[in-house]
Image (cartoon, rainbow, N blue to C red):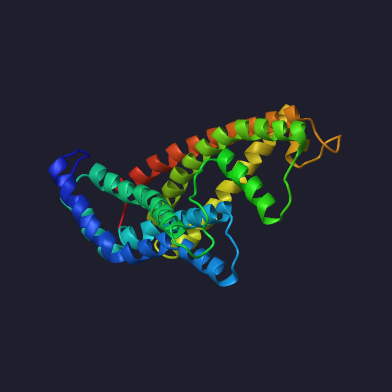
Amino acid sequence: MNNTFNFNRFGRLLAMDGRKYVRNFGLIFAILCSLNIVLWILTLVFGFPMMTIFRWLICYLGMFLATMLVPSKVFGDINLPSEGVRFAMLPVSNLEKYLSYALFCLATPVLVLLGSWGIDSLLTLLPIGGFDHYIKHWGFLGLMQDFVKELGAASDVDVNMGEAGFEDFQKFTSMFGPAYNINFIIGIVLNVGLFMLGNLLFKTHKIGKTLGLMILFSYVTSMIMQIFFASTGLLPMMYGITPDAQPDINMVTDFVSRSMLIVLIINCVFTIGLYIGVFFKLKTQKY
């Protein structure tokens, strides 16, 4: 069938894939959304409050595990000889197969993140445990500010960097935060595409081999950044080698802004390439 799109036909495909999703991934989805319960139990047993950034990291861990697992658990048979032939013979277009595949794989980490946050928020309502407040900030700037405040409270120390130091901290995080947030979102989409493609390329050990691809991608990104900073004279800053013990804040912010820009460009290029590759691999899959 050619690359056409029909809403009714696509709806039936979504329903079929949805039933398969619930059957193969429903329990895993519930577990990944509930990981913060482990942290809450630890605070209950040992009697200490849990810092917001660690609760956020567990939410992110669940999201990454969902990104990693959902393609192989739900669509792991689409490139296998016997099961893949049935997938190839479905009376839907390649475009519809691709959109359904991408929709479930992209929606799952977002839903896991929202589910984790929802359960975390419910735990803060309980009169026991160490979840004292909601996770209010998801962006870099808010998280760093919460971290500094909670670190001072946990150590009974007034975290005071001085007026100049605090202004530098605000300047740095204000500049770095938005770029980090954009790269964070692009990174999620990139990781989903990487595991979608790995699920189609490999017939066995899909997750492990795709993690190998991810390491290779990180290495290539690092090499590109080194070449870029070598050409701009900022390579010593990349390794923390500076003439002064405390580099000028303007130099640091310039370095970080350039770093985030080059990472954003690389991530966007790779992300577009990955999703194009997924479509053509799905379209030309041989059994």
Report the residue at 80% width, 33% height from top. 247
Q: Is residue 141 above or below residue 12?
A: above
Residue 180 in which image quadrant: top right
- Along the horizontal axis of the image, is 278 left or right of 188? left
Q: Position of residue 213 (x, y in %)?
A: 52, 53
Note whether residue 226 is visible: yes
Report the residue at 18% width, 45% height from top. 10
User: Which quadrant holds the C terminus?
Assistant: bottom left
> Along the line of sight, which residue is nearer the eye, 119 or 102?
119
Number of marks: 0
The residue furthest bottom is 45
Note whether residue 202 is visible: no
> Along the line of sight, which residue is nearer the eye, 86 or 33?
33
> Along the line of sight, which residue is nearer the eye, 147 or 25?
147
The residue furthest left is 8
Q: Position of residue 174 (x, y in %)?
A: 61, 32
The residue furthest front is 127
Q: Position of residue 212 (x, y in %)?
A: 54, 56
Q: Is residue 233 above or below residue 10?
A: above
User: Which quadrant holds the N terminus?
Assistant: top left
Report the residue at 27% width, 62% height from top. 22
- Along the horizontal axis of the image, is 125 left or right of 239? left
Q: Is residue 183 above or below residue 15?
A: above
> Along the line of sight, which residue is nearer the eye, 285 or 90?
90
Q: Position of residue 223 (x, y in %)?
A: 65, 41
- Along the horizontal axis of the image, is 142 left or right of 186? right
